[in-house]
Image (tube, helix red, strand yellow):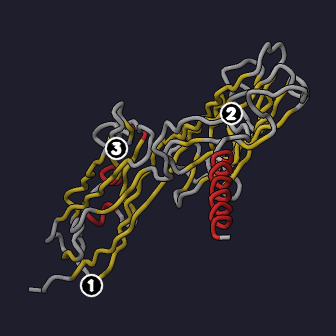
């Protein structure tokens, strides 16, 4: 009896091992590609350098001080220095002995992206310390006053994403085993950026045509604008993204895009931080089954800010 029980347990373990091995095989046909990106949903980080500005200063031009903003590119898009503006708002420039032009500057150099080098090492993005010097409250106050200083950064940014679609010589033919499946969700990889591509799906649209759709989602607290609009809060600029789709094949047509070339490039507006793009790929005159990489690029502008408080104290009257 004991021997029978031992043999039964051993047989069950063998069956579990075999079943586990079989279940590890990918039988879904889902397209699989290596992730070329570091990923993430962060673009530029902005913060005040500690002690700059000081928590307290004095009035009557007796206490010049500086404000320093730390600007760090934590995403995977390079930013030209002319495509980024770092500013101070919340105070009137002339009250602190400066002009409006003094309170908005470009970084000293290109803000390079984070990336992974050929050896797999992560190279961090550029960090710049932007200084605003010689602030000095000129007037004489009757008593202490608190001011809000807001640091702002406006910059162009970009998201790149890759996925795959399945192309077969007869999309509707089910009499043979194909190298890939058309009717399924696909893996999609994104570069590190606040705007992401998700929910990439492919569907058959006849024997020689496929359709794929994807969502564009803005996942950060940044304000989103049309690229190179200067973060201008006008209706025609807000929540606009320029989309470029490339399948490497002729006969690609995307809907929901305006401007551009009318087929694979154009602008889309996000509503409630989301939009959907639908594309149709012609697959006629195909001699074999294969998978094709789809590259997607999003171009846009973002605005972030950080606030701090400064108390201007009334000096002792003589």
Q: Residues within 10 Å of mark 2 (few under 14, many from 20)?
A: many
Q: Secondary structure at mark 1?
A: loop
* Residue drawn at point x = 34 percent, y = 42 percent: 122
Q: Quadrant of residue 106?
A: top left
- What percent of the width, then of the height, locates residue 193? 50, 47
Can you tell which quarter of the image residue 261 is in?
A: top right
**Residue picked out by circle 3:** 125
The disc placed on residue 25 is: none
Which of disc 1 and disc 2 is earlier in sequence?
A: 1
Helix, strand or loop status at disc 3: loop
Q: Using the numbered discs, state the Cα–Cα distance from disc 3 to disc 1 in whole angstroms.
A: 41 Å
The answer to whether mark 2 and mark 1 are in CB contact below 8 A is no
> Depth check: 169 or 40 in front?
169
Which secondary structure lies at badge 2?
strand
Residue 47 percent location from the top left of the image: 34, 61
Query: Distance between the Cα atoms at labels 3 and 2?
Result: 29 Å
Q: Quadrant of the N terminus?
A: bottom right
Label 1 sits on residue: 144
Which residue: 64% across, 63% down?
9
- Mark 3 or mark 1: which is in front? 3
Quadrant (top left, top right, bottom left, bottom right) of the C terminus = bottom left
Q: Which residue is mark 2?
A: 266
Q: Is residue 203 above or below residue 307?
A: above
């Amino acid at each position: 009896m004991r021997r029978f029980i031992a043999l039964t347990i051993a047989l069950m373990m063998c069956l579990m091992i075999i079943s586990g091995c079989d279940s590890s095989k990918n039988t879904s046909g889902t397209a699989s590609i290596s992730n070329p990106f570091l990923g993430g949903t962060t673009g530029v980080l902005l913060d005040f350098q500690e002690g700059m500005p000081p928590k307290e200063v004095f009035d009557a031009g007796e206490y010049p001080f500086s404000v320093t903003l730390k600007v760090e590119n934590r995403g995977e898009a390079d930013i030209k220095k002319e495509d980024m503006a770092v500013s101070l708002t919340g105070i009137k420039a002339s009250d602190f002995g400066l002009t409006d032009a003094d309170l908005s500057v470009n970084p000293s150099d290109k803000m390079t992206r984070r990336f992974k080098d050929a050896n797999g090492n992560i190279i961090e993005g550029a960090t710049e310390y932007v200084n605003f010097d010689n602030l000095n409250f000129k007037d004489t106050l009757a008593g202490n006053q608190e001011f809000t200083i807001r640091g702002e950064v406006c910059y162009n940014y970009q998201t790149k994403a890759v996925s795959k679609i399945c192309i077969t010589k007869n999309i509707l033919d089910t009499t043979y085993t194909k190298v890939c499946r058309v009717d399924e969700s696909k893996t999609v990889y994104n570069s590190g950026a606040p705007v992401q591509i998700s929910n990439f799906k492919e569907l058959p649209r006849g024997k020689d045509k496929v359709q794929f759709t994807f969502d564009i989602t803005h996942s950060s607290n940044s304000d989103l604008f049309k690229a190179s609009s200067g973060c201008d809060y006008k209706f025609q600029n807000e929540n606009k993204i320029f989309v470029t789709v490339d399948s490497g094949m002729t006969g690609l047509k995307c809907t929901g895009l305006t401007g551009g070339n009318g087929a694979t490039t154009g602008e889309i507006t996000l509503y409630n931080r989301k939009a959907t793009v639908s594309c149709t790929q012609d697959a006629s005159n195909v001699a074999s089954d294969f998978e094709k990489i789809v590259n997607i690029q999003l171009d846009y502008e973002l605005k972030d800010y950080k606030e701090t408080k400064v108390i201007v104290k009334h000096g002792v009257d003589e």
